[in-house]
Structures are given as C-alpha cells and as structure tokens.
Amino acid sequence: MQKVLKGYKYRIYPTDEQKKFLSQQFGSVRWIYNHFLAKRKDEYLNNKKTLTYHDDAKALTELKSQDGYEWLYNVNSQTLQSALRNLDSAYLRFFKKQARFPNFHKKSNRQSIKIPQHFKVVSNYLHIPKLKTTIKIKLHQKLPENQECLFISKNPSGEYYAVFLCEVEIQELPKSNISIGIDLGLKDLAITSEGEVFQNHKFYRKSENRLKFHQKKLSRKKKDSKNKNKQRIKVAKLYQKVSNKRSDQLHKITHQLVNENQVIIAESLSVKNMIKNHKLAKSIQDASWGELIRQLEYKSKWYGRTFYQIDKFFPSSKTCNSCQFVIDALPLNIRDWDCPKCNQHHDRDLNAALNIRDKGLKDLGLWNVIPYQKLSEASAIAESTT
C-alpha cells in the first residue's frame, strides 16, 4: 500500500455569469504571470539581480494597494500566488537546462487556474472562492476526501473541467512471474513478445479528411465574426474527439499490460528526433508512443511492477533471436525475414519484441530468473491470432 497523488477530472457546467467570472480569473492569472516576468527581466537587465518567488509575492501585495489595481481583490489571492510559483518554477527549469527561457503567456482557447484551498463539492455543486454562486459538476465517479488542490480549465471546444488532485492509497497488484517485451510500431501500435498485437487505429488519419473540410470552412469565415467562432468550435470538437479516442485506447492497453505482467520492457525512443522525418512525423504523433511509455512508467510504479527501457541503439529488429546474428540492413517495408546463419524465419515485430525482452532481462539481472516463452511458443501464438 502506497500513497500517491492522483488527478480526478470532472465536467462542470458554469452559467453565463459564471463563465464571465472564470474568464476574469483566467485573464488575471495570465496578467500577473506576464507582469512579473517583465519585472524579472527588467531587474536583471538593469541591476543584474534575479528575483525570487518571495520578492514577487511581496511586490504583489504592494501592487494590490496601488490605485488602478483594485480589481486584483476580485481574484483569489492563492490563485494569483500559484501564477508566481509557476513563473519561479519556469525559471528554475531554465537554469537547470531542462526548458527554454519563460515566454509571455498569450490569450488562447486553452486556459486554466489553480485553486489550492477553500473549495468544496456539495450535492453535485462546486464551491470556489470569490464566487457567490455554485457551479454544477457531474460526478461520474466517487471523489476521494483527501483533496490537495483544484484546477479549473477550459479547452478550445468551450468545455469546462474541474481536476482535483487527491492523495489516495493504491494497493500493489499480486506478484507475477511473467515478463514481457514490447515493440512499438506504426503498422501495429504495439507487439508483445507473447505474440499479442495491439492495433494502431490511426484516429487522426481517419478523421483527416473531415478535419480538412471544416478547417477550410474556418479559413473562409470573416475575421472576428460569430460564424468564425462557431466554426472554430466545430474544429476544436473534432480534435477533442480524436484526442479522447486515442487516450481511451492508450489507457486500456497500459492497464492490461500492467495488470498481466510483472516485468515490462520497452525500447527507448527519441520521438523528438524521429518526428524530424517529415514522411513519418504525422504517423508517429498519431501513434503517441511517448504517452504510452509515460503511462506504463507511472502505472508500473503505482502497482509494484518493474518497467525498464533498453538502449535505443540496440538493433532489436536486425538481430536473430535464435542465434543472435545481426544482419546489415532491414528496411521498413520488409515485415519478415530469414536469418542467413540459422535459417530461422522471423516476423519483424515479434522478433524485435523478443529481443527487447531478452535484452532487458539481462540488463536487470533477471535472465534465467523469471520464466519467459521461447521463440517457437511465441511464434505459434502469433500464427494462431492472425
């Protein structure tokens, strides 16, 4: 049993007046972030001094008392402070060379605020600071009691959501003696060393023609007109539908893999470098390998599983799993091949998954400790499923 922070997301339905209030909150947080970013830049350029969060928080208190800034009292003080913490965090990541220098925030169709305290949910209604009325919320699942903070967001399609960050206890899954290797691909999304194939549904590709049609209509609408905004929402909803389908599939796949296997081994992929290939970039992003790996990583940690990634330069596809012979080249269009040394016939993806599993078990020191299927058994499974 371990305690973790887990997000619970619910749809909320604010009234027109409440939407106006939330819009003011979004705008105030964005203004505070930009104001103090500019102040930090000026202070460094003029005095060579780097301001801290405490410097900004003190200046924010003084700013509220100045003429013309009384409107800041209409915003929850802790929400404004969270914007300062985000700015300070952006600076720290920049100094650690983990991110680029912070940019000014622009008004966009995707906005959010953080409410650290003084919120509650009572009978399907959400109470938040500074708002006298309550917001209707759809509780499609039980909300835990230990709520650390609340995020309210608006997506480009105009939908509002409340995300509660809660501390929950997660029970580790029963120990298993099954290990598995996973090869990620474009033809099929994932192929396991046991011969199981997870289909790549290519959600974006299938919606591309419809998106193209509606985006053309959007480009022809008059700038800043009501019809243009209506069409923008249609396009945003189509993108949201694609994203929801992809997210649902990835969660189902990772849930199954973590539930059934004790050791999960995948390959390290430099997705940022791979999408530089303009011929494959759209397909790689549609497959969302990075999100699949991210989910496997944190779910394995939650439920007591071992997740490991082998070196990205390991030739998993070109190595014969039977005799370890490595062929010189294997173009992407070749889906199966015969080993020139032992004459073993290989399915490209299944062979790669087996090699990934074997390499990972050796790296972890679990070779000959955890049982695994032989190549012939896995091949038989693959043939029976096709």
Image: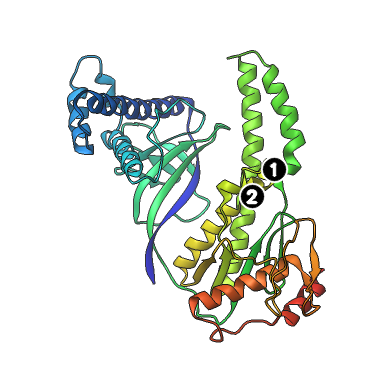
Front in this rendered view, residue 103 or 250 = 103
What x and y, as percent, mark residue 122?
39, 46
Horizontally, residue 38 falls left or right of residue 46, namely right
Q: Secondary structure at mark 1?
A: helix
Front in this rendered view, residue 360 or 165 = 360
The colour mode here is rainbow
Residue at 40 percent of width and 30 percent of height: 103
What x and y, as percent, mark residue 338?
81, 72
Residue 274, above or below 359: above
Residue at 48 percent of width and 29 percent of height: 15
What x and y, as percent, mark residue 90?
35, 39
Mark 1 surroundings: few (<14), some (14-19) or many (≥20) residues within 10 A: many
In the rendered image, the residue lying farthest to the front is: 328
Q: Secondary structure at mark 2?
A: helix
The image quarter in which residue 342 lies: bottom right
Horizontally, residue 343 falls left or right of residue 196, namely right
Front in this rendered view, residue 294 or 1 = 294
Residue 336, above or below 341: above
Say if mark 1 contacts mark 2, CB within 8 Å: yes
Which residue position holds label 1? 204
What x and y, as percent, mark residue 287?
65, 51
Horizontally, residue 291 falls left or right of residue 70, namely right
Q: Amino acid at mark 1?
A: Tyr
Q: Amino acid at mark 2?
A: Arg
The image quarter in which residue 328 lies: bottom right
Quarter the N terminus occupies:
bottom left
**How far separated are the C-alphas under marks 1 and 2?**
9 Å
Q: Earlier in the sequence, mark 1 or mark 2?
A: 1
